[in-house]
Amino acid sequence: MERCARVIAIELDAELAGYLREKFAGDSRLEVIQGDVLTTDLGQWGPAVVTGNLPYYITSPIVEKITALGPLARRAVLLVQKEVAERLAAPPGSRAYGYLSVAVQLFAAVRLLFEVRPSAFHPPPKVDSAVVRLDPHGRAAELGIGDPRAFLEFVGICFRQKRKTLRNNLAPVYGREVVDAWPEASLRAEQIPLETFAAMYRRLVSCPRRIS
């Protein structure tokens, strides 16, 4: 609180929201909103740093909501389940690398800062946690991705069955005659970096024989 000119706290639990209002009643910099973060317009307050201890069962949709803010999210520092943190920051070729890795790294640079043991919580959870930092960037435009949503649909198909090759995942949708010509056809999606996914997508969009 001491470092911020204004803090907007969103808390679903009415009792806890009331407790925070009472505890910080003398501090005009804090505004407590009792509500669901998934239905709250996070962009209404303009550019801001986003931070939070995310409920593990809705981490992915919250992270997606934050990355959708674009430049309005100056930075995000989030406490999440360790396994999810590893997936967010995973590089290509690692076991944790998957669709979520690509979807977040398309919009932000991700760093896993440190781990948090269960003993730091009361009551302690049954899993380890970790803090990640997301720094938004403009990679989508730099990579020539005009429609990020359509691009991520393509990436989702690439990862549809993670142990299968791109040829096996993509051919039923876009046609084997299209995919067979790609040098990446025999690779698995977990081996492909963001830049190569973007190149494949641009290639697909420009292909006059692609299947819609």
Image (spheres, rainbow, N blue to C red):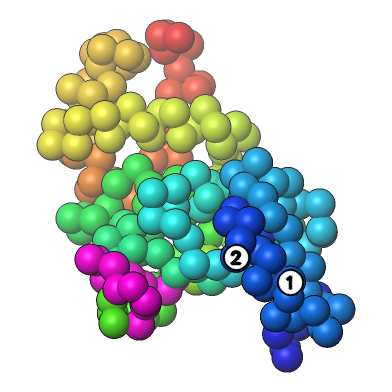
Please indicate, yes or no, whether residue 89 appears anywhere in the rendered image. Answer: no
Q: Is residue 121 left or right of residue 212?
A: left
Which one is in front, 25 or 57?
25
Q: Which part of the image, by quadrant, shows the C terminus?
A: top left
In the structure shown, which secondary structural element does the residue marked by tag 1 occupy? helix
Extreme-bottom residue of the structure: 2
Q: Which mark is residue 201?
A: none
- Residue at the image point whose x is 79% and y is 68% from the top: 31
Q: Where is residue 151 shown, x and y percent of the image?
A: 49, 33
Say whether disc 2 or disc 1 marks the residue closer to the N-terminus. Answer: 2
- Residue at the image point whose x is 42% and y is 74% from the top: 131
Occupied quadrant, residue 176: top left
- Specify few, some or many for label 2: CA neighbours under 10 Å numbering under 14, 14-19, or 20 or more: few
Q: Which mark is residue 21?
A: 1
- Residue at the image point whose x is 40% and y is 9% from the top: 211
Q: Which residues are magenta?
A: 120-132
Residue to which mark 2 is pinned: 16
Q: Where is residue 62 shown, x and y percent of the image?
A: 53, 50
Amino acid type for the residue under numbered disc 2:
Leu
- Specify few, some or many for label 1: CA neighbours under 10 Å numbering under 14, 14-19, or 20 or more: some
Q: Where is residue 28 shown, x and y percent of the image?
A: 86, 78
